[in-house]
Amino acid sequence: MKIVSHWINGAISQSKSERSGEIFNPATGKVSGNVNFATTATVDEVVNVASKAFEQWRHSSLTKRTQVLFAFRELVNQNKEKLAAIITEEHGKVLSDALGEVTRGLEVVEFACGIPHLLKGGFSEEVSTGVDVYSIRQPLGAVAIISPFNFPAMVPMWFFPIAIACGNTVIVKPSEKDPSAIMLIAQLWKEAGLPDGVFNVVHGDKVAVDALLTHSGVKSISFVGSTPIAKYVYENGTKSGKRVQALGGAKNHMIVLPDADLDLAADAAINAGFGSAGERCMAISAIVAVEPIADKLIEKIKERALKIKTGDGTKGADMGPLVTKVHRDKVAAYIGAGEKEGAKIVFDGRDVKVDGEGFWLGPTLFDNVKPNMSIYLEEIFGPVLSVIRVKSYDEALKLVNDHQYGNGTAIFTNDGGAARRFQNEVEVGMVGINVPIPVPMAYFSFGGWKNSLFGDSHAHGTEGVHFFTRGKVVTSRWLDPSHGGINLGFPQNT
Ligand code: NAD
């Protein structure tokens, strides 16, 4: 059985662990390995290593950094099938979806390959006689990335390529549920020529996270996970004087206006609602149907959903299992709660039949969901779609804007004016127009509003470069030999 341990200073840590957790294959329900959990002492060790490596890495030339990034990009690309297989084995998502996650992560590496351009500062000559001003951006030091189970490769990749390209050293604390993908990534960094100690991994749970949050050697925290933990990480990380970006949960609405192409909308609802078994922070979970189209739309979604094959992600299924039994049961309990609260079940994922002991749950669709029901108010994070019927665009917009989450949303319509109004009025960070999962490209930034993000910086793009660097402005005068004299007044630019 595999044992997954920390990656410190370019090697797998051999030290014995006091605590560990089980790793499951969600498609078989069987334990496939164990992961060592870091103690506070392990976190101390890794922070010391990363801080020491920073002294050298911050002075590496931009050319050297770019060469390592290009080599890493090639290696991840060559190993993407292997990486996808590891993800499917521990997360459960189907292989094609796992491959998609690696490909989207690679986009951030490609963006970071342009770091010499991204770090260029500004220069103003002669702001005063003989005086020039220029801005530079400098790395922070050892930075921590704490990631969730649902994208074990892509989410850490939103951050570490840019952090490293900017001259920082990195400590990743991945989810304990699927810890192996990041270990292959660590090896690929080494093969790419990244010096030891620049990229490190500690595994574990709250103990490791708390130690990272309070350690004075950790200069920033990039967190992605559920909203209660994101809030906790933001509050405690900033209390310890760190820069923190903490991305939280979601409840993404898809608004379907009466003039929309209903086939396109139904395809989108299926793909964005049930892809990765709904375990995506950009999954659609609330379909807001502006009447009179709800009946027709539901019919089209049902036709498609009944063809979805739930099963082992390595054996040609469309939708894999949920990540753990506990999570599967929690999602199933939400279906029970929705039924009790009076929503109408159109099809019920609890009835799914799949061989084996995997954590199975098929697609579920609710109709007549009301805004006060728990299945509408809370994030379910499973293959459960809710239809809320409304009478107008204004009613639909109010629903989205009143919701506690503001990660992603999408509008389906053929009316350009309505779409334009929506993108202007909606209080959500990422908006799709006839596009269901509007995950921004790496050169834009990823992040939600309201309870979907704590902090000011979104991930990657220009905001990523700013998050992983501090600005400095230099005002310089090289004296004209004839210039001199004392002046105690405030410096003025004349
Ligand atoms: P989670 O909050 O349970 O765990 C996230 C990380 O926090 C893990 O590394 C975990 O070990 C750690 N953690 C868990 N409990 C902790 C505690 N009490 N104290 C300190 N650290 C703790 O999230 P998850 O179940 O792994 O992931 C699913 C969640 O992530 C969903 O809510 C989803 O919406 C969210 N998510 C958000 C985005 C986004 O971009 N906004 C992206 C992906 C996932």
Image (cartoon, rainbow, N blue to C red):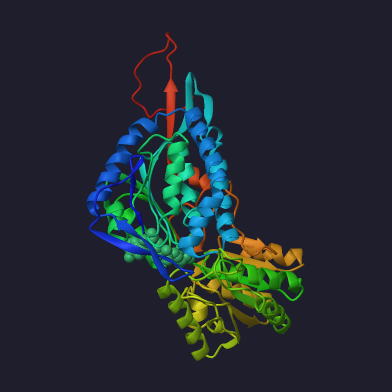
Tell me if residue 230 can be seen.
Answer: no
Residue ID at (47%, 77%): 331
Image label count:
0
Residue ID at (42%, 14%): 479
Using residue 277 as the reference point, say whether residue 417 is left or right of it. right
Rendered position, 296 above or below 209: below
The image quadrant where one finds the N terminus is bottom left
Tell me if residue 316 can be seen.
Answer: yes
* Quarter of the image where ligand 1 sits: bottom left
User: Splitting the image into 4 quarters, where does residue 229 fall?
Assistant: bottom left
Residue 256: where, in percent of width, then height? 69, 73
Rendered position, 470 above or below 479: below
Residue ID at (27%, 52%): 214
Rendered position, 211 above or below 405: above
Using residue 289 as the reference point, say whether residue 242 is left or right of it. left
Residue 35: where, in percent of width, then height? 34, 58
Rendered position, 290 above or below 5: below
Residue 73: where, in percent of width, then height? 54, 41
